[in-house]
Structures are given as structure tokens and as C-alpha cells.
């Protein structure tokens, strides 16, 4: 293999640039040419390639977003689109592709492998919802962005002795809610993976009142439903006002944390090693603090589960 | 005068604690007893007083919110409530009151003065919408919180080459929107003080597209209307998707910036000096970098205007 | 067991407060009385105890430092001091003690156990240098504080095209240097665990020059020697100026990251469970993402080793 | 005038990029060609020019450092060097130059004007030590960087009940020390503009001890002398240990605050207007919140004075 390519796909996440840098630099270390594909699968089809050298990835390790950009690509959903993509790769004499993104992006990578083109996935998404890896690139940063802002809300909640309901990201996975909830001492944490009882939440608020707690914070993962509606329901039950804040897209950007920079660097480098070792159709993962890999199919056969011991612990500690 | 009181009222703002600290320490420096009133006018009526010494305000200069807390008080809207408040103050031999808050809080203070009780106002609100002062305590922090989070959104906007619409606080005043908009290079800034044309916004977006701009950010002050609806209208006009984020209450809390800590310290100290000089019915202000004061009525006769040169400059620089 | 105590000892680290909170809240959850000992072993000898309830640890999960404070204690190095400490604990009918701190603090805990008093250690130190646990409380925050500030230095280094030498904490362990070095793309990382060749550093600088790199950053763990002297030596070899910054004690404080808050919450809770299960003379640990524990002696028989794969990877990626 | 140039010179400061952006965009707005000169006066002599368009300054408003870079230039100190610089400018048909930097850089600009070439200065330095303007670009960011890190030190100081001595930047001017000192409640602030008495500092520490203060922070501007030596002297007088941290170059970088971005945008735009109006040999300034300008010579005839009312207030409030 003499030339490899790298792309980012799906929602951006902090650390993607560090992963791109690692792919390029590790690739160059092994004497490979490295090509950056712009806008994910769109650039793959259009042949929108950038030749990357050591300097192309200088001064990006600490930047959020992705210098290769990302985009949805309808054409890649068609067999014609995928064949065009592979043809392009072959014409450029590219021998392997690193796909940095979420599980949707990995399914795209599998289509390429089905057409005979070697791909390796690097898990990059703030949601931490990819099975087979303990952490995804961007999750740690997203949780820290969440708690820094919830800390701010806490000041106001405390000054006004109010209840705040904060919606964090996580359509299918409660990981951000769980970590942010434990880290910020939230009274209640609502996640898609666990049913919730409104009466329970209300009872926990009442208990806080009784022990003269100055404020309460309830964290809601977006997959559970609208925090605004939940706030309304709680108001009806308690008869007391509350305030709702939806953190939204601020959780997706920002300079990556040390954890995410290190994780991304390791994973990007591992992806290159896997390609060089002739591996394909696999994703890089971190399990028990070790960088490893597993077949996409093995990962997809598993189901992501957040650490529910955090849920239980948060419930005990926020009494 | 041997004893003074201090309270915070209205929405909390970063730097209120630094102002409380300054009132207490400057008061003690002049040999005064200082009493902290809890929960604004509610505590004034209920006699919820804390005796404050030097240590009471230790380790708070850098904290958001207000240690004296704040609350709405319906009872203070009645003549009976106000008389009770003054009676309480007199029974505790308090000779003057410092009210830290917004213009609503200052009108409350005027009612006390009308009943013969000396009050001085210190402008504390993130909105910067108090006439007579160039800056209010908390505004600088709120703008910085806004831009730190808009910087994060910029990463995602740039990675996905999308338009983002960001709603910032400011029900009546566009100051936060203006400063954040200029500071973050927003393509368009929508504020209550200036009419806006949807076609204008759309034309600016188109112009950015033509010069291959990677992303656009539109800042909307909450007083202009719902950012979600504005986003919808823009989408209909442009035929392109956009994303909306409402920054919300995160702009109210957080550790105050240096500017706000210094401003609050100066204003709090000045309030004590004014009371000692026999002044009343006045608010502290900063004008042309100098701490000064003016009668509440003079301030209320003026109208707050944001610096519209910022509006014009932002429009030119974000081309 | 009906009453337990908790203390913090040694250098403070971010997350200690979250650990204290977890000990108190988990203890109360199990119906235990919890006593906070002030100033580490000093308070143990002097009987400087605080009764802790749920509210005592409210609003501290996000604060750096330790509300129980810490101090050196010469008297505890004597048998008399230790006996006095145990006597005090017994007189207060305390059945177990949680010691949050580093390995020096754990050796103190062992002395108590030798006198028959059950202790459990919770690893809290920014240095990550305690054998037997993958991470210590405070390490993640310290690394993030380091990289946020090195990011700032990078701006200046890049603007002036200069080499910067940054000294980070770590007297015996290179963990902070390694993580910060990989996370910030440092050209060279000097740690106590690996010998370094000045010529190597100089050659790496020259290589960067040749490929027109705008700046270089060299990270030095304090245990390696004075960054100022190393900077001087590099200057003599290269004939070019460089700048040195010693990050110093800013790495010890600050609001803990999500990782540290979660780790501290889990570890503090686990310590209570261990005491209730009749365990003693053990430390809590995290290994392979699981909270676990091991005897102090087992830990002390091991040697802490930083992850040298990070060292190698950083060297490859910073070419 | 159809073409102007812009350069940054001297130590970099946060906001320089926002000023460059404003010069380029405002220039383009008026139909001017804008040229960016690399590495300050070095690039002026070497003709190291970049043609700047709207996109050249995209996505830089929030970045620290300067994309045009900066360097010392010995050759510019010679008449030959300066003549070469002017010749270069004239050959490129450049009609005016904006110099962003400190007073040393402005003196360089004056040499060009003496040779008949119009220059306008924009004050960019973290030190705030340029006479004639209330604030310089970068000062607000530097103070905020200082206090964020001193807040961290405060955690440790408080946990260990220690005295910390923190050295901040400011070789000739005490502005950073004054603002950071008031904003962080420092017990003593040592600046070049005011003599200090060691006994005074010690007495203030003793007074803090007497009222059971948990920690003390002493801020030293670098121009006063080595914080390490001052720490040593204090230790000898008090007999108690203290810790010293030198914040160093971290104060020079980092993403600029809103204040600095707005100030830089205004000043950069004003510089273009001045050149277009035929002005020369002047610097842009902000006085009493208004953007204005004054001749270099007028500024140099003045002496920068920090606001000593801050000094007095800090002393009263930190009792």
C-alpha cells in the first residue's frame, strides 16, 4: 500500500482534527502518501481530494470541528454513487480509507469494503453511542462543555432558589446526560435507556425542599423528549415555576480536551497500522484503556449501553 | 450613619458578589456595621438580615450569582409592604440601603426613599439596559459567555458549511447581541432597536455563498422574536437548512470577568461613599471610565441606547 | 459501624471536594454519621472534627481545592502522635476513616491500621503517580489546565516562530508531561522515566526548521530538572533563542473536569462501601474503567509506570 | 490611495488578528487593495507581502497571536534598512501603512513618516502601557488569563492556608497587576509605579492571620523585581513558607475577550479611515469609550499612568 485516504463524516466532534493529524503523520511516518477527502462521502464521489503533508495538519490538534469538513450525501446511498466512489479511489491509486465518524458513517464504509475497497473506521461522535468501544472521540469534550455551562446555570439556580431543567444532547444514548448529571450533582437524570416517573422527580424535588436545598437541576437527554414539555409537566405537578435551557449545538464544537486529543491521536495512528497490516472492515476501539479493534459486524451485533452504575450513583449522591 | 444594609434584587448577574463584598468591606473600612438582606425586597419585609463582617464576603469575588440571593416580591408592590420594609430597617437602626439590581429594583428603591429612607442603586444586570451608565455589572461576562459558546458553534458551522442562528439574551436591549455579533463576526445582527428586513439577511447569506464562505452566523436578541421562527423564515426564503441555538440562561451565571469584578468593586465602594456623604435616591454609574452617580429620576428620564456604531461596523466587517 | 470520618491530606487536587461529597452522601445513605477531619492528620491529632450532613457538601462538587483543607503534620510522624489520633477517633466512636490523598498519605493511613484502626485510601493527586490505579483524582484536570495554557503559549510561539520550553508538574512521574505533550503536539517530551539526549532534541528542532515549522514546544516534567537550565543548554547548542515558562501551581487548582468529578464520586462512594464491608488497609482504584480496590501493600509493591506508548506516539506524530 | 499595507510588530497580543481583519475588510469596503506584511519590519524590508482578500481574514477574529507574525528587526534600526522599506512600499504602489504594535513599533512607524511615507499606529500590547489611549488591544485578555489562573491558585492557597506570590507581566507598567489584583482580592499589589515597604506587606499578612483568613495572594508586576526573591524576603520576615508562581508567557496568547475583539475591530477600521482622510503620523486611541486618534508625538510626550484609584481601592477591599 502506498497511498491512503482519510475522511470525516456525520456530525462533527471535537478531536476529529487530532485524528486526521494522526492518520496523516503516522501514514507519512510509514512512507505513505496521504490524501484528505473533503466533505465525507460527497468528496469521495466527486474526487474532491487534498494531498496532505506534515504541514497540512500542523496547528490543528487543538481545534474543534474538522478541517476536512463533513456533509450528508444522498448519492452515496445509491449503488451508482458507491461504485463511482471506489472507482475514484482506485484511479488515484489509493489502497485504503480511514473513515472518522459515527455508526452511520461506518455502514457507508462497509459498502465500500463490499465493493472490495479496504476501510477502517475511527469512532468520532459526541454521543458515545457506538457499540464495541468504551469511548468515542468527542464525548469527553461534549460532557465538559455541558458541565461548564451547567455550572453557570447553577449560579443562577442557586441565587433564585429555582429548579432548572437542562436538555443535553443524546438522541439514542444517555451517556452525556449521565456523566453531566453525576458531575453536576443533578437531582434527576432522564435518559432514553431508563423509564422515568414524573412523581419520582417531583418527590426528589420535595425532598430537596425539605432539607432546604437552594436549587435543583434536572438533566434531560434529548432522546427522552422536549425539556420544555417536561418542565411544563413538572410545573403542573409541583405548582412551582422552573426554567428550561436547551444546551444544543454548543456541545458539538470547541477545543478538544486532553482526553479526546490523546484518544484521537491513538485511534488515528492505529487505523493506519491496521490498513498496513492488511486489515479491513474493522473499527478502532478503546476497551479497558487499550487501543484495539473489532470487525464492524461484531460491533453492530452489540448494543451500546451506558454505564448504569453512574445512574444509580448519581441518584444516591444527589439526595 | 452607623449601620447600612445591602441587597440584590431582580435577575442575578455575574459580579453581584464582588459588589456585595465591596459594600461590606468599604463599609467596615469606615467603621460601619453592614447588614446583608436576603432575597431582595422579600427579606427587607421579613427582616431576613445577616450581620456581615470581613470574612462573610471572603472567597466570593470570583463567584457568579449572589450570596444574598434574589427573589420576586409581590408584597413590596403594596404600600403596606413598603412601610413594613422601612419600619424593619429603622428598628434595626439601619441608616441607608444599597440596592444592587436593574431598573425595576431601582424603582423599588425609590419607593423607600419616598418614605424617607436613603437608598443608593448599583446597576447589576447582564442586559446593560440601564440608562445613565455606560456599563452595568455582568454585561461583560454575559457577552464573553456568549462568544465562547458561539466560538464552539462556529466550529460546527464551519465543518458543515451551515448557517447558524443564535439567540442571545436581551429582551429590551440589543447590547449583548451587538457586542457578541461584532466579536464573533456575525453576518447579521437582529436587535430590538433596529428594524430588520428578511431580504437583507438573505442577500447577505447569498453574498457569503458567492465568495465561498464556509459558514454564517446570525445573532438574534431575544426581544426581536423567536430565533426558531426566524430560522424557519430564512429557510423558506433561501431553500437551505439552518440550525438554531438559544443560549438561554447560561449567560446569567459564571465567574465574572476582570472587567466586571473591577466595575463591581468600584461601584459597590462608591455606593457606600455616597450614603456616607448624605446622598440618596441616586444610582452609581460609570461614564467615560469614571465612576460617578446621578439621581434615579435623571436616569429614568433618559433612554438607554446601545452603541449603534457597533451595529454599522459589524455590518461592514462581516461582508 | 455507625460513624466514619474523612480527611484530605498531601497536596490538594481538583476533585477532592467531589470525593468528600461522595463519602458524606453515600455514608448518610447508609445511615452513617460522617465526620470531616480538618487539615489532614493535624486535625486527626487535634480532634478538629466537623459533623457533616447532606448540606455540608452541597455546592462543592465543582470546586477545586478541598473544603477540609490539608496540611503537613510533623507530629503524626511520631508514635505518640499516631496514638493520640487513634484515641481521638475512638473517643468519638468513629469506626473507620477515609483518607483522600497521595501515597505519603496512604502510608500514614497504614500506621493507623497498624494500631487497629480501619482505613481506606482514595487516590487524590494530580501527578497520577500512585501504583495500582490507572488514574488518580485530579490528574485529568491538571492535564487540561496544562494544555489550555500551552495552547495560549502556542499562539505566541507561532506568532514569533520561536521555541518554547514549558515545565509541567511531576516530580517523580512523567504522566502530566506525556499527556500534555501528546495533546499539544510537543516536539520533545522530557520525563523522569526516560533518559534524554540534548542532541536528539536539537535534531528534532532542526528537522522542524527544515520543513518550515512555525514553532516548537518542548515539555519538561519538573522531575527532569530545571526547564530554565534546559532552555539555556538548548540555546547554546542551537544558537537560537528560546523562551521558558514554568506552569507551576496553577496545575493544582481549578474546577475539576467531568472525568475527575465522576471518578471522585465513584471512588468516594466505594470507600464507604469498603468500610461497611469490613475492609481495611486498602485503597480504592480504577482499573480498566472499573472501580476496584487493592491492599495498600500490594500497591506499594508495584511501581507506577506511565504509558510509554504515549511517549512513542508523541514522538512519531510531532515530526 | 488605492493600496494600503498592514503589519504587526513587537510582542504579539490577543486581538491583533481581529485588528488585521478590520483593516483588510474596512479597506476592501472602501475599494482598497490591502497587503499583509509578514514578520513586521523584517517583511517590510524584504518585501514579504501577502495580498489579502476578504477570505484571507476569515475565521481569525477569535484566534490569539497574529497571522502576519512578528519579529525583531535589527536592520530596520539603520537608515539603509528604513529606506529599503520605503522603497519597497513605493514600488508596490502602497499608499499607507497600518502598524499594529506597541510604542517601539510606533517609533519605527515614525521613521517611515519621516521618509515621507504615511503611517497610522494601532496600539496592540498586553501591557496597556501606551500613553494617549485608555486601553490597548490585548490588555483585557491578558488580565482575564491572569485571573483565571490566579483563581486556580486560590483553590490551592485556600486548601493549604498558604500565602502565594504571583508574578504577572508588566515590565514598565503595573496595569495587569492592578486589575488582576483588585479582581482577585490580592492582599498586596506591587507595581513599578509605587514604592513598596516589605513591612507593610508583612503587616497586611499578619492582619489577615488575625482575622483567620484562609489564604493570602500577593501580586507582583515583573518590573518590580523577581517574585522569587520577594517571596524569599517575605519568608525571612514572617518565618512562614510561601509559594511563588510566575505566570509568564501564558498571558500573551489565547482567544481574545469580547472587549479586545470589539476594540481591535474598531481601531483597525479607524486606522483605514484615517489613512483615507490623509492623516499620518498618528495613533488610534480609545478615550472615554470613544475611538479617536492623536499624533504619535503628542502621545510620546505624555506618560502612561495606571489608574491609581484601583490601587487604593484594592488596598481597602482586601483588608
Image (spheres, coloured by chain):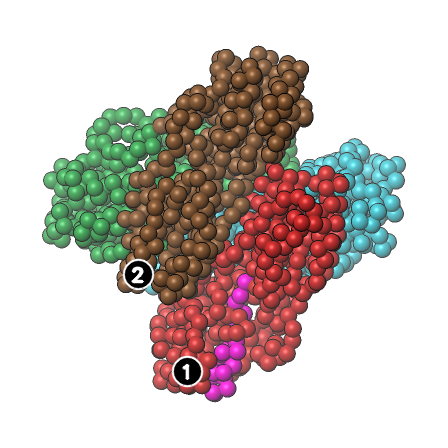
Chain colours: A brown, B red, C green, D cyan
Residue for point 28% across, 63% down: A210
| Label 1: chain letter | B
The answer to whether A209 appears left or right of D175 in the picture is left
Is A4 located above or below residue B319 in the figure? above
Residue C36 location, x and y as percent? 24, 52
Q: Secondary structure at mark 2?
A: helix
Quadrant location of the C terminus of chain D in the rendered image: bottom left
Task: Kindly identify which residue carries mark 2.
Answer: A206
Q: Chain of mark 2?
A: A
On the same chain, marks 1 and 2? The answer is no
Local SS, label 1:
helix
Q: Is residue B111 visible?
A: yes
Q: Establish if D185 lies above or below B50.
A: above
Residue D157, position as x, y percentages in the image: 38, 50
Residue at x-position 41% and y-position 86%: B80
Quarter location, residue A298:
top left
Image-based side of C156 in relation to D102, left or right = left
Q: Position of residue D151 (x, y in %)?
A: 45, 51
* Residue toward you, C169 or A208: A208
Residue C121 badge: none
Q: Which residue is mark 1?
A: B81
Magenta span: B106-126
* Depth order, front residue of A284/D259: A284
Amino acid at each position: 500500500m502506498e497511498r491512503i485516504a482519510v475522511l470525516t463524516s456525520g456530525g462533527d466532534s471535537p478531536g476529529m482534527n487530532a485524528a486526521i493529524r494522526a492518520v496523516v503523520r503516522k501514514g507519512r511516518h510509514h512512507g505513505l502518501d496521504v490524501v484528505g477527502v473533503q466533505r465525507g462521502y460527497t468528496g469521495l464521489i466527486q474526487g474532491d481530494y487534498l494531498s496532505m503533508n506534515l504541514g497540512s495538519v500542523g496547528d490543528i490538534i487543538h481545534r474543534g470541528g474538522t478541517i476536512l469538513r463533513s456533509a450528508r450525501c444522498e448519492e452515496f446511498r445509491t449503488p451508482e454513487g458507491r461504485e463511482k466512489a471506489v472507482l475514484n479511489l482506485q484511479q488515484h491509486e489509493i489502497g485504503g480509507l480511514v473513515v472518522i465518524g459515527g455508526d452511520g458513517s461506518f455502514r457507508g464504509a462497509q459498502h465500500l469494503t463490499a465493493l472490495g475497497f479496504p476501510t477502517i473506521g475511527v469512532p468520532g461522535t459526541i454521543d458515545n453511542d457506538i457499540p464495541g468501544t468504551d469511548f468515542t472521540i468527542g464525548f469527553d469534550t461534549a460532557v465538559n462543555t455541558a458541565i461548564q455551562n451547567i455550572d453557570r446555570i447553577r449560579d443562577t439556580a442557586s441565587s433564585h432558589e429555582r429548579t432548572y431543567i437542562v436538555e443535553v444532547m443524546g438522541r439514542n444514548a444517555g451517556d452525556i446526560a449521565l456523566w453531566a448529571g453525576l458531575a453536576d450533582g443533578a437531582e434527576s437524570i432522564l435518559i432514553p435507556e431508563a423509564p422515568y416517573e414524573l412523581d419520582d422527580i417531583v418527590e426528589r424535588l420535595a425532598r430537596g425542599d425539605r432539607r432546604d436545598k437552594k436549587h435543583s437541576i434536572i438533566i434531560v437527554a434529548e432522546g427522552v423528549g422536549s425539556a420544555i414539555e417536561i418542565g411544563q409537566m413538572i410545573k403542573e405537578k409541583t405548582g412551582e415555576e422552573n426554567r428550561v435551557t436547551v444546551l444544543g449545538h454548543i456541545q458539538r464544537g470547541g477545543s478538544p480536551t486532553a482526553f479526546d486529543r490523546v484518544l484521537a491521536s491513538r485511534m488515528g495512528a492505529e487505523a493506519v497500522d491496521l490498513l498496513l497490516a492488511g486489515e479491513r472492515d474493522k473499527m478502532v476501539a478503546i476497551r479497558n484503556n487499550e487501543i484495539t479493534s473489532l470487525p464492524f459486524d461484531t460491533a453492530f451485533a452489540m448494543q451500546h449501553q451506558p454505564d448504569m452504575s453512574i445512574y444509580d450513583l448519581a441518584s444516591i449522591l444527589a439526595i
